[in-house]
Image (cartoon, helix red, strand yellow):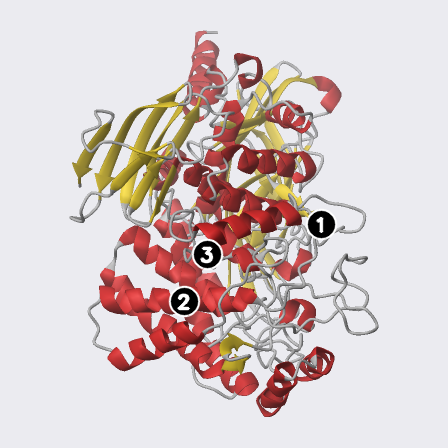
Amino acid sequence: MKMSLLKTVLSLSLILLYFPLIAQEFTADQHLWFEKPSESWSKEALHIGNGYFGASLSGDMECEQIAIAEKTFWTGGPHSKQGYNFGINPGGKQQIGNIRKLLQAGDFSQADQLSAKYMVGNAKGYGYFSKVGQLLLDFKHKKADTRDYRRYLDLQTAQAGVRYNHKGVAYSRAYFCSYPDKVLAVNLQADALKSITLDVSHPLVYQASSSTFQDDVWTLKGTIEGSGLQYCIRIWVQAKGGTTTFNNQSLSIDQADQVTLYYTVETEYQQNYPTYKGNDPEKGTAATIAKLKKRDFQSTQKVHIDDYQRIYNRASLTLAGDPQYDTLATDQRIRSLKMGNIDDSSLKALFFNFSRYLIISASREKTLPSNLQGTWNNFEKAPWNGNYQSNINLQEMYWSTGPTDIPEANIAYINWIKDIYLSGKKTAAEYYGTEGWVSHSVGNIWGYTAPGQDILWGLYPSGSAWHCKQLWDHYLYTQDKKYLKEILPIMKDAALFYLNNLMDYQGYLLMAPSVSAEHGVEFDQENRPLALTTKNGESGEQLLTVPSFQDIIMIKNLFVDVQKALHELDFADSIFDKRLADALDKMYPVQIGRYGQLQEWVIDVDNPRNHHRHIAHLYGLFPGDLYSMSKTPAIAQAIKKSLQLRGYGKKGSRWPHAGGNWSMIWRSALWTKLMEADVAMDIFNTMIAESGYPNLCSEQSGNFQVDATMATAAVFSNMLVQYEDDILHILPALPSEWPTGACKGIVSRGMHQVDISWENGKLLTCTITLKDKRKFPKIYVLGKAIAENDPRIVWLHR
């Protein structure tokens, strides 16, 4: 009797050690939690990841369904049966001159037709992102026999969990994906001995050719159809007590006291243009399991938490919430926001923290960057192929890495740019006949930089200019000159491409042919632009290659950034610098149109009923930095008018694709830069109301995407800190919803690290840490200049 009691006490002690949330309440801004299992992968599943691969958890008490996705599980590529030529079609460089002559003559219709024939890529071997499969843990715990169910995600430790009582036994599950150990760990416990019984199976998208079980390790090997890459999965089963039986397709664990599953997966993929092959998945997964076998679960758990918190704890946002909402389950809080309640301020802090969590979980050094689904997928073919969509989405995912101090996550994106830089040279030569490099609107893991297969969305030669903005911003936030020397040639060669391709148009220089992101100009039968649109810009009679300002503005920003980079490194390249300066002087100046808007096209054809999701002509305010309220007030006002005309990006019958997550968060970001706090927050709230999910993710056109969620922390950071024109703005766009709060670790592009507290909408304290020896900037608080000796401001040097 005493021995049985002792075992029970020890068992409970272990549960409290592994699952501290059993002994305490969930916190309003650090935990997502629910009172029922997930019924929808997109809307309710909890996602964990380590940058290499991700796991999506249903939390079902009867059968846990874990959707496993690994970023290199792509079809297509150079080893596919159909072949792969990086999407390049012949004929572009022979026709580019003719297309430009048509544009100069104003014959946009013929330019469209010739572009549609010669300035498109092909999808042969492009491929798509696939999931690995479903890891099923069948417990056979009937819902009718369970109570006290909780499912949660702890953002402070990047661990998910499930707990419930089944027939008087308390069960607990913990899940985490460790980046250092490249493993998914699943720990199963109960407060009674011999209570853990389950079947483990793993239905795969690409069937395994080999399935073996030896030394408690289940090994699955196979080939990804469509890419020819081999994969290897290893699952180490560590059971205390009970028996484990293998029957080739599944494992059966019976009456164990505790079970831990360690899951790892790799493919042959290696990021090395042009072969993209070289990794040994059998060797890599074997090494992972061998390392894990030298530790106990607590040690592996600690390695994961220490690695994660080293990054996550650098920045935080705390907002005074409402006790009425702070104790509600997350889905109830989201439902309340959708109904119009904006008093749950700590929910916005939860969004901020979840945004950073998702970035860290989806993107790390030596991994591929986040795609449209991050590193999660529940489909054989991910929506939009799981693209690296480069006309907003990919870039938007990484906006938060600088201001919330997550430079490690940015490395994956930077390395991907370094890779496509090589294939982009080939695209520049074959389509444009020039030196330099270029990429367009879509990308994959195989170095695709060609235009897309339709000029409506694929003829977008400014993708590389936008990528270079992320390269430069990483330097601004880190001041790493060794890094700047590495990426300067990439930026210079991008600028070289545009220098070689700017064409004369009405006495100015601009980039053509190009299509203003994913829509065109509607004309009548007499070739006159319609005063008021009757279509949605993506259908009917429209002209697409009308020269637009998106390219002009992005290229200008690139040229300015390259000039700054050259001067930052004291590089004596006066000839190239002069070429940039001359081109900047001659580029088509932005125009303010008849409605007071910033024109999207060089001709004044903006339509007040055009509510299209893309707003790339406003890039110069954000994420670009050509314009600002103080430096270019007239242009800033025109951008404001454009945003008013374009609307919030809400869905509508005429504009079914106008709404969605990424479009609305960009609008929120722009209104934040205009220091219109409540408009920016209203758009965010509208985005959640229209497109938000209970698991804090959101959708575009009905499909789960992570871009807006990842960008949220950047937008909220800019509400609290902005740096432009040598002015550091503190609380420049503080929403009325956030009357009292505090933040720490917010970083400006000027390398200031800022900690702030405020109460009732007024600044209490502000500590500014300079990361180098630069001079102190001017300070504005809530839009007004303050005295140099203001007692609320404390200056520190690191």
The front one of 456 and 228 is 456
> In the rendered view, would you say 397 is above or below 617?
above
Tell me what residue is drawn at x 27 percent, y 32 percent: 786
Local crowd size for mark 1, using a 10 Å CA cut-off: few (<14), some (14–19), many (≥20): some
Residue type pointed to by label 1? Ser
- Residue 701: numbered disc: 1
Circle 2 or circle 3, nearest the eye? 2
The front one of 272 and 632 is 632
Tell me what residue is drawn at x 28 percent, y 63 percent: 483
Residue matched to label 2: 558
Local crowd size for mark 2, using a 10 Å CA cut-off: few (<14), some (14–19), many (≥20): many
Tell me what residue is drawn at x 69 percent, y 71 percent: 544
Which tag, 1 or 2, sits closer to the chain's start? Answer: 2
How far is mark 1 from mark 2, CA to CA?
31 Å
How far is mark 3 from mark 1, CA to CA?
37 Å
Residue 335 found in image quarter: top right
What element does badge 3 sit on? helix
